[in-house]
Structure formats: structure tokens, C-alpha cells
Amino acid sequence: MNYLLLGWLSCMFLIFGYSYSLFKRFKNIRYKINLPVKKLLDYHCILSIIATILAFLHAGNNLTNIKFSTGYISLILMILTTLIGVIMKYFKKTYINHRAFWLYTHILLSVMLIGSILLHIFYYLLLQ
């Protein structure tokens, strides 16, 4: 199995999943695709879960030899971001009680995730 291809696929699913943020904030884009925000949130969740699974498979051959690297930081951040997103989406009672905490944690982890993935990609593009 080509682990590099899994990494790129995971990155593409993550980009498509993160496009939800653009559709939510820019109404002129949202009206062009003609989908309600709730449906876009469902796609965002599904694409992010698929991206996390693909990233886990991408790192699969190196899980026995864990080192402190941008790849493992990205994987951990991706898992945490996805878990918090699932909590926000499917466990409404927990989310409503501490809405600001979950939302800002999700946004902060997402920004950190994008940065670590970019570092991971640039690091391996420069080395190969």
C-alpha cells in the first residue's frame, strides 16, 4: 500500500472538510452551491472523520517506532480535533453546557493542525 498516497488523500479530505468554514462565513459562496449550513456541517464531519482514518492509516507503518515529529504531532492534533468535533456535533448536552470552551478549543486545535500538517509536508518535500 502506498502510504504517501494515503497522506495526500487525507490532506485532500481535510481541505474539503475545512471548506465548511468558508461556506459558513461567506454567504455569497453558500448561495452558489445552494446547500443549507446544517447539511454542510454533516459533510464537514464525515469528511473530517474520513481524513482522520486515512491519516491513521498513513502513519500505520510507523506506529511501532514513535518519534517526536511533525507527523505524529499532526496525527494527535487531528484525532483530538475530530473527537472534539464529534462531541460538539453528537453530544449536544455536553456541548451546550460548555459551548465556548468546546468551540474555541476546536478552532485552536484546527489552526494548530493546519500549521503542523504544512510543516510535515514541507519537511518531507525538502528531504526527498
Image (tube, rainbow, N blue to C red):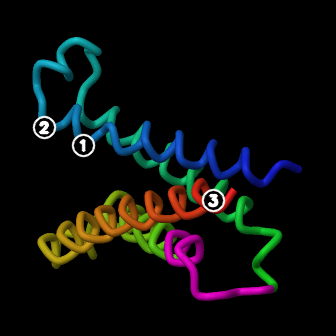
Tell whether label 2 touches label 1 (CB within 8 Å): yes
* Left or right of 84 in this view: 72: right
Range covered by the magenta-colored residues: 65-75
Q: Which residue is drawn at 81% across and 85% down?
A: 64
Q: Distance between the residues labelled 2 and 3?
A: 27 Å
- Name the amino acid, label 1: Ser
**Residue designated by label 1:** 21
Tell whether label 3 touches label 2 (CB within 8 Å): no
- Name the amino acid, label 2: Arg
Of callouts 2 and 3, the N-terminal one: 2
Q: Which residue is drawn at 33% across and 34% down?
A: 40
- Name the amino acid, label 3: Ala
Kindly state the secondary structure of the residue where label 1 is placed: helix
Kindly state the secondary structure of the residue where label 3 is placed: helix
**Residue designated by label 3:** 55
71 over 57 or under it: above or below: below
Q: Residue at x 82, y 70 (%)?
A: 61
**Residue designated by label 2:** 25
State the mark number for residue 97. Answer: none
* Residue 113 drawn in magenta: no
58 over 104 or under it: above or below: above
